[in-house]
């Protein structure tokens, strides 16, 4: 009886240890992906109407990224609150520049462009916020003329 109880306890503890190790490894992999997520704004242009801007971005990081938020707003104001949607996918290739069409809020010569991106392998299109804590927010200063 004591041997049987010992074997059961050993199997339960082994199962728990394997499960905890797997969760820990998964968490570490997500955090590494976040650290290697990088975006650069190469340049930006206003549309003729001024209501949108085309923002050209590249990705010198290690993982392909999906941009879920892109907004251009006047310096000194707060960015508009918007739900996440897929603006584009940026391959992990710094020589490839991808244009994104972003809404513009405010008017004046000085702006910020704010981007939120997440590694594609962590992105769930049905539930965009699932792994949002592993995304990166990038904010760049822009001097644009209309």
Image (cartoon, rainbow, N blue to C red):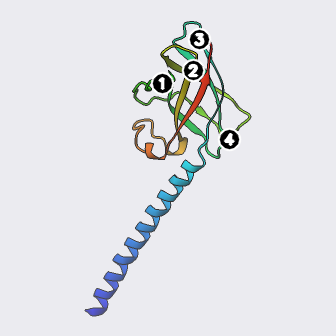
Marks 3 and 1, how far apart in space? Answer: 22 Å
* Mark 4 touches mark 3? (CB < 8 Å): no
What secondary structure is found at the residue carrying circle 1? loop
* Mark 4 touches mark 2? (CB < 8 Å): no
**Image height check: is 35 above or below 52?**
below
Nearer to us in this view, 66 or 78: 78
Q: Which residue is mark 4?
A: 60
Q: Which residue is mark 3?
A: 47
Q: Depth-wise, is mark 3 or mark 1 nearer the camera?
A: 1
Q: Earlier in the sequence, mark 4 or mark 2?
A: 4
Q: Earlier in the sequence, mark 4 or mark 1?
A: 4
Q: Which residue is mark 2?
A: 110
Marks 4 and 1, how far apart in space? Answer: 29 Å
Marks 4 and 2, how far apart in space? Answer: 26 Å
Q: Earlier in the sequence, mark 3 or mark 1?
A: 3
Marks 3 and 2, how far apart in space? Answer: 16 Å
Q: Extreme top residue here?
A: 49
**Image height check: is 23 above or below 49?**
below
Residue beneath the point at 41% across and 67% down:
20
* Mark 4 touches mark 1? (CB < 8 Å): no
- Expressed as whole percent of the image width and height from the top left, the position of residue 41 reads 64, 30
Q: Which residue is mark 1?
A: 76
């Amino acid at each position: 009886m004591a041997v049987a109880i010992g074997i059961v306890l050993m199997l339960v503890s082994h199962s728990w240890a394997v499960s905890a190790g797997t969760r820990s490894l998964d968490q570490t992999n997500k955090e590494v992906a976040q650290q290697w997520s990088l975006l650069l704004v190469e340049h930006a242009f206003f549309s003729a109407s001024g209501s949108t801007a085309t923002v050209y971005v590249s990705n010198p990081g290690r993982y392909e990224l999906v941009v879920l938020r892109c907004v251009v707003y006047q310096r000194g104001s707060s960015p508009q609150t918007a739900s996440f949607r897929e603006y584009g996918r940026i391959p992990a290739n710094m020589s490839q520049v991808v244009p994104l069409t972003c809404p513009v809020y405010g008017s004046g010569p000085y702006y910020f462009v704010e981007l939120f991106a997440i590694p594609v392998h962590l992105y769930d299109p049905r539930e965009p916020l699932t792994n949002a804590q592993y995304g990166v927010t990038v904010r760049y200063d822009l001097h644009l003329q209309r």
